[in-house]
Amino acid sequence: MYTIRNLGQPTIPSPVQASVFIDDGRRILENPYIDAENRPVAADQRSLEIAGPRKVIYFDPSKTKAAIVTCGGLSPGINDVIRAVVMELYYGYGVKNISGIRYGFQGLIPSYGHPLMELTPDVVKDFHLDGGSKLASSRGSQDIGEMVDSLRRLNINLFFCIGGDGTMKAVQLIAEEIERRNLDISVVGIPKTIDNDFRTIDK
């Protein structure tokens, strides 16, 4: 069973206007297929939490700072994802402080000197009309500790990482370092690929 660690007890009513809220106890099977006898095909029935809005949330949107980064090779739809995240944070949750990390994880390493990009609905409204990544990207590993230092220094609470398998491995290491330091930073991996190598979807 795959689990997502909670930073703490959520106590803030969600500002999201949703017709359906998801309970944390609801899960979906990784392999949903059954045989002719209605028996699960997979012997190992691993499951995942269902995504969606919760009735109560952990971070106070009025005090929350979010950041978005795009890493690795370019693939279609990256700018759409950036735009969608910003719009939902801003209008759905009321998070007004959103930054774009430029040039992938390099943007979290001070020695590269990449400035942040302020992301507002006005800035991102036409992002979906262009290809590539408006935040630019980069390849190669960066020091995990130094990146977490930057997240802490920038007072980032929500960190959205758009990338492929290499990026997701880095996201896991970043999350582990954040947990080791007991920091209140939520890391969200948003997978994308140009290689059509998602394991749990039909190709």
Image: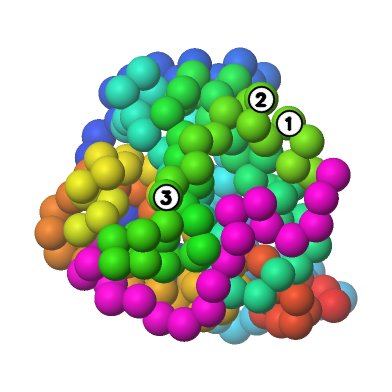
Task: Identify which amino acid the numbered label 3 is placed on.
Answer: Pro
Q: Is residue 196 visible?
A: yes
The secondary element bearing badge 2 is classed as helix
Q: Residues within 10 Å of mark 3 (few under 14, many from 20)?
A: few
User: Residue at (81%, 50%) from the top-left corner?
Assistant: 130
> Does the residue at mark 2 contact the one at mark 1 (Cβ under 8 Å)?
yes
The residues tagged by marks 2 and 3 sit, at their Cα atoms, a distance apart of: 19 Å
Q: Which residues are magenta?
A: 129-148
Percent across and percent down for residue 2 are 45, 66
Q: Pointer 2: what residue? A: 122
* The stretch drawn in magenta includes residue 133: yes
Q: Quadrant of residue 91?
A: top right
Percent across and percent down for residue 44 are 55, 80
> Does the residue at mark 3 contact the one at mark 1 (Cβ under 8 Å)?
no
Task: Identify which amino acid the numbered label 2 is placed on.
Answer: Asp
Residue 125 is marked as 1
Is 189 situated left or right of 17 in this image?
A: left
Q: Is residue 24 visible?
A: no
